[in-house]
Structures are given as C-alpha cells and as structure tokens.
C-alpha cells in the first residue's frame, strides 16, 4: 500500500499566522529577539516592521503533516519524527496566509524501520515562496 | 542597534554562543498550541506511559526551533539564516535541560554572497546529543553596505 504513496502529492493546506499563536510560540521557546516584538527595533535592523520569529516556521507545517500522517496510515504509537530541514526564503509576517503543498519524495525500508521522506513548499498570499522543507517520518515496524 | 559581525571576523572552528533551555510541560503545551500539534505523545501523560515513554516527550520541532533561535540570536540579522537541517536522535523529556551549541565548519563565497556552514546540535544534561544538524547563513563583508 505504501508503494502507491510514493510521489503522491498532498495539499494545499492553509495556515494563518496569528499573533496570538506567535505569542504562544515565543512563550514556548523564549525566542524574544526585539525584531520579533517591536516595530521600531525591526526598522532599526532594516526591516519595514516586526517579523515573526524565523523559528516559527517549525510550527506552521503541523496541520499539513497531520493530514499526510493520516493518509499514510501509520499507527501513532509507532511514529517518530526523524528529522527536518527548512530553507528560509522569506521571513513570515503577522497575518500571513500560508499555503503548503507537499509530496512523498521517497519511502525507504531499513530493517525494522520505514522512513517516509516528505518534501514541500509554503507560499504566502502573494504567491511568493517563503519556505521549502524536507521532513522524515519514521515508522517502527515489527 | 543591529549587532556587528562580519564574514572576515569568523574563522572555521568559531564557536557560536550556546542557548540553554529548560524543558517544562508548559513549554511543550504552548508549543503544541502554536502549531496545533497535539500528538498524544506530546500532550497526554497516560498515552505516553502506555506506549512505553514513561510520560510525554517534547516535540522534535521544539529542539529544532531552539537551534534556529541559537543561530538567529547570534547572527546580526535573523534573516541571514538561510537553511537549517536537523536529525532527531534522542527523546527530550520534561525536566531535561537542553543546551544548543554550534561551530563554524566552512566559509565560502558563492554568487557574490558570503556563506558560513555550521554544525549545530542539542545536548541534554547528561551530555547526550539529542539533535544534530547543519545550518547555513550569510554574513556581510566589512565595508559592504
């Protein structure tokens, strides 16, 4: 069944960057760079207003990932997150309307593990690419 | 004021200022709120016990976020960070203290841009590397506007 999933595309999934979520994130991570909190500090650093933490990218893909995990039919108690890579193309901003698409780039069987390698990208409302990513899910088998 | 740090000032082997974070249940739950990742292994103690983890574990992406934060705290501008990839090697539990560390391993110029490549990792209080990865960033040259 997993073979049919190779190359399959998922999405688009929508995530809206609300400041409330950014505040939750900053509380979780302690990522309090002034350019994320204060328009004036951001302008002094050469931006046209405050940014969303670069690290917040990590929180924007969960919805997409969960949908794919559902489609992969992986038992949650056997699922691990093996790794993740982001290419940061453009900083996220408050109220950004993000659309993520991804595909199953590869499925690799290794002894008692099956790796699902997912690749995707996220664009903003203007259609500009903001993030590219690759993520590895590990299913413990047997 | 933006911090000053130039490509010329950085040599291979340069150590990035570490970032230390204590892992609390509150951090994990707030992280779940931010991204909507409520996988029961991160938010449900009973489920964590049932699957043999002894309780909840932190999201791998929380450690990832800490590594990004270490880089963006250090770089003069957070948008100088171009790429970060990480592998989650060990589980992170409430009560752990995670130290993120990094070191510049390569400097190069490509298409007129100055790049640095860094190895980055998270260690727990026992010195075990729970996450390892690579970060790529750009830096300005002295005198470059």
Image (cartoon, grey):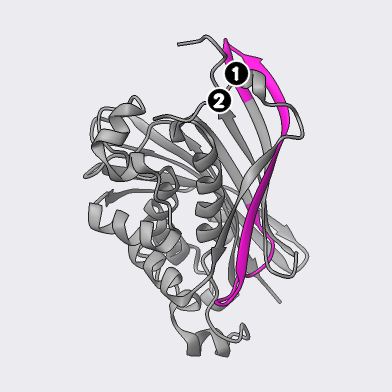
Residue B129 colored in magenta in the image:
no
Residue B65 place in picture, x, y as percent:
50, 53
Q: Is residue A129 left or right of residue B89?
A: left
Q: Secondary structure at mark 2?
A: strand
| Mark 2 closeness class: few <14, some 14–19, many ≥20 residues within 10 Å | many
Residue A47 locus on image (x, y percent): 31, 28
Q: Residue at x 44, y 69 (%)?
A: B27
In the displayed structure image, the side of residue B49 where residue A120 appears, left or right: left
Look at mark 1 in the image and give the residue it sits on: B114
Lateral position of residue B117 relative to residue A102, left or right = right
Q: Left or right: B46 with respect to B84?
A: left
Determine contact: label 1, label 2, CB under 8 Å.
Answer: yes
Front residue of B61 and A83? B61
Residue at position x 52%, y 74% from top? A76
Q: The magenta stretch spans which residues?
A: B87-115
- Residue at image position (52%, 80%) is B56
Q: Main secondary structure of the magenta part?
A: strand
What percent of the width, then of the height, locates residue B10? Answer: 67, 26
- In the rendered image of this protein, does residue B110 appear above or below residue A95? above
Q: Which mark is residue B138?
A: 2
Depth check, front residue: B6 or B24: B6
Say whether residue B36 is visible: yes
**Callout 1: helix, strand or loop?**
strand
Q: Earlier in the sequence, mark 1 or mark 2?
A: 1
Can you give x and y, in whole percent of width and height, for residue A21 in the image?
29, 58
Disc 1: host chain: B
- Is residue B93 positioned above or below B141 on the image? below
Q: Quadrant of the C terminus of chain A?
A: bottom right
Do the dots labelled 1 and 2 sit on one chain? yes
């Amino acid at each position: 069944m997993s073979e049919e999933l190779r190359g399959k595309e998922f999405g688009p999934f929508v995530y809206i960057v609300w400041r409330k979520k950014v505040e939750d994130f900053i509380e979780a991570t302690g990522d309090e760079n002034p350019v994320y909190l204060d328009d004036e500090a951001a302008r002094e650093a050469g931006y046209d207003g405050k940014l969303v933490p670069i690290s917040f990218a990590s929180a924007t893909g969960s919805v997409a990932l969960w949908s794919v995990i559902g489609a992969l039919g992986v038992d949650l108690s056997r699922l691990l997150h093996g790794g993740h890579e982001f290419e940061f193309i453009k900083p996220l901003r408050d109220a950004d309307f993000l659309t993520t698409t991804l595909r199953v780039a590869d499925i690799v069987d290794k002894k008692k593990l099956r790796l699902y390698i997912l690749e995707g990208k996220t664009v903003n409302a203007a259609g500009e690419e903001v993030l590219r990513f690759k993520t590895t899910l590990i299913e413990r088998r047997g | 004021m933006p911090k000053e740090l130039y490509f010329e000032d950085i040599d291979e082997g340069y150590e990035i200022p570490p970032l230390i974070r204590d892992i609390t249940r509150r951090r994990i739950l707030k992280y779940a709120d931010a991204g909507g990742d409520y996988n029961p292994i991160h938010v449900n103690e009973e489920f964590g016990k049932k699957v043999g983890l002894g309780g909840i574990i932190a999201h791998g992406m929380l450690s990832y976020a800490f590594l990004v934060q270490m880089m963006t705290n250090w770089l003069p501008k957070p948008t100088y960070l171009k790429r970060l990839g990480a592998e989650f090697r060990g589980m992170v539990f409430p009560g752990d203290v995670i130290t993120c560390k990094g070191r510049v391993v390569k400097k190069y110029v490509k298409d007129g841009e100055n790049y640095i490549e860094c190895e980055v990792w998270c260690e727990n209080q026992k010195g075990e590397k729970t996450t390892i990865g690579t970060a790529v960033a750009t830096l300005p040259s002295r005198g470059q506007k």
